[in-house]
Image (cartoon, coloured by chain):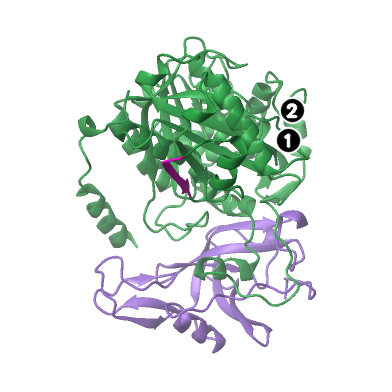
Chain colours: A green, B purple
Amino acid sequence: MAMFDQYLARRYRTTVRPRPEDYKIRDNVAIVGIGQTEFSRDSGRSECQMACESIKAAVDDAGLRIEDIDGLVKFAMDYTDEMHIVSALGIPRLNYFGECGWGGGASCATIVHAATAVATGAAKCVVCYRAMNERSGRRYGRVPGVEQVMISPNDHFGSIMPYGFATPPSWVAMFATRYMHEFGATSEQLASVCIVLREYACRNPKAMFYGKPLTLEDYRTARMIVEPLRLFDCCVDTDGAVAIIVTTKERAKDLKQRPAIIMGATQGIATQGEMMTSVYRPRISGIPESWYTAQELWRVSGVTPRDINVVQFYDAFSPLIPMQLEEYGFCGVGEGAAFCEGGDRIRLDGELPCNTSGGHLSEAYIHGMNLISEGVRQIRGTSTSQVKDAELCLVTGGLGVPTSAIVLRR
Amino acid sequence: MVMEYNPAIPLLRPHVDIDNQGFWEAIRQHRLVFQKCKNCGLLVHRPRPMCPRCNSMEKEWAPSTGRGVIYTWVNFVYANAAYPGIKVPYLVVVVEMEEGVRIISNMYDSKREDIHIGMPVEVVFDDIAEDLTLPKFKRRAA
């Protein structure tokens, strides 16, 4: 195992990457519009309708017209399709479209694809969106029971499902057990993450947990879901939609909002992984996809972790925040949980405010897209928990799967 | 046997394909094997078409000692976040085998309070149904 690890490390070191000066996205592309529906437990309408509502809201927010949209990037996991959306909104034509895979790993990846299209001139004005009735429809944390004998759809599922290793909280819990064992991380430290994010949500009237503070006692007495994760370590289930509009920095000058300039937008797959159950790697107390994505993000953007004023970490489960603090370089390996202890360092007046809308744990779970819109609000200065003079914001995509991240600048 | 099944909701069966059939055929015969590269000797699990170290496609099935230690674990306690065909609580473990590879499985003879990371375990074969045998793990003396 050790020898194998060294071999892969050697291959990584000899990888040739494009020069940062050839990276066309940096400082040339911007997010100019954000739109969303309300976040609820039962939207009462179709995902296509919510997608259209959020896209229209983002177009209005930007000061654009529907006919300005010429590109669209969706989640592979989204049930809506671009033909239907184009017809419903009355978009006359699209000349750039595509979809990004791997669940929430697609969130910032949609921005990577949109920004690439805009930077190369393949498109002028690209919409990225996610619409889901994830609470009233199919809940991702649950497994439908099968009534007849069925065969797993692939070797990966065949290696987990027959053992009942079946749900996202259990997949993240598997890493959390090892992380807590190796680094002495405690459930009280995870509780701090949940409590701080709930404080942010209580300042955000659009958050699903607005007006519902969380105490350590509430956290401790909530039911265990998959040990070691308790109820509030897991994100909320949400019906809703979010849309983001990407265009050139030049075009942004004529539009309504202060643009959120994209300094870097990167994706990452790390070797020897599989969807949320990469337990075969030499070390599983970290997330290599996030580390590789971070390395590339800091390299192409010219930004360092020390420059970042505020972060929106993908937080489907609480342990993912300490793990990303480590992988993105905000603290050393094994120090992430201690970083979160007591919560002061990730609060609004702390050194690194995190997930200032309440995040997935307490605002809403729109598969990472509501984290991007909160990143944009921080750059505009319009967050309900505004970091004073926020200049640079990091947003990360779903992890434990092929992941993605962006750096936004004022 | 610790795990209890709900017979109305069968377990999903493994997906047997050309790359992994040697593994599952051995399991049916109550043998645990891992894929080994004939060229460079690298052991990998899950099986795959090519050796990631030397890119050889020549491989064989190497018998495992069946012994390992618990590397990490989870305890399913909330039925709505578990597989509905298995009654909670149940344990899923990752076992690190003596050969160095890891495998996902269940504990065959242990409850939550019996296990810890680093605990020595050995493979046991669980004939759950006529068409389903799975490798599980039980405690062993160190």
Q: In the drawing, what numbered circle is on residue A215?
A: 2
Question: Circle 1 marks a residue in which chain?
Answer: A
Circle 1: element type:
helix
In this figure, which residue is indicated by the disc labeled 1? A219
Q: Is residue A158 above or below residue A77?
A: below
Q: Nearer the viewer, residue A44 or B141?
A: A44
Q: Nearer the viewer, residue A245 or A186?
A: A245
Circle 2: element type:
loop
Question: Marks 2 and 1: in contact by CB < 8 Å?
Answer: yes
Where residue A349 appears, as percent x and y from the top left, is: 55, 14
Please tell me which residue is depicted at 59% across the width and 71% down the height of the picture. A152
Where residue A173 appears, as percent x and y from the top left, is: 60, 50
Question: Circle 2 marks a residue in which chain?
Answer: A
Please tell me which residue is depicted at 69% across the width and 77% down the height of the picture. A149
Where residue B126 appears, as percent x and y from the top left, is: 64, 81
Q: CA distance from mark 1 to mark 2?
A: 6 Å
Q: Nearer the viewer, residue A363 or A372?
A: A372
Tell me the magenta residue range.
A94-100
Residue type at the position of mark 2:
Thr
By secondary structure, the bulk of the magenta-drawn segment is best described as strand
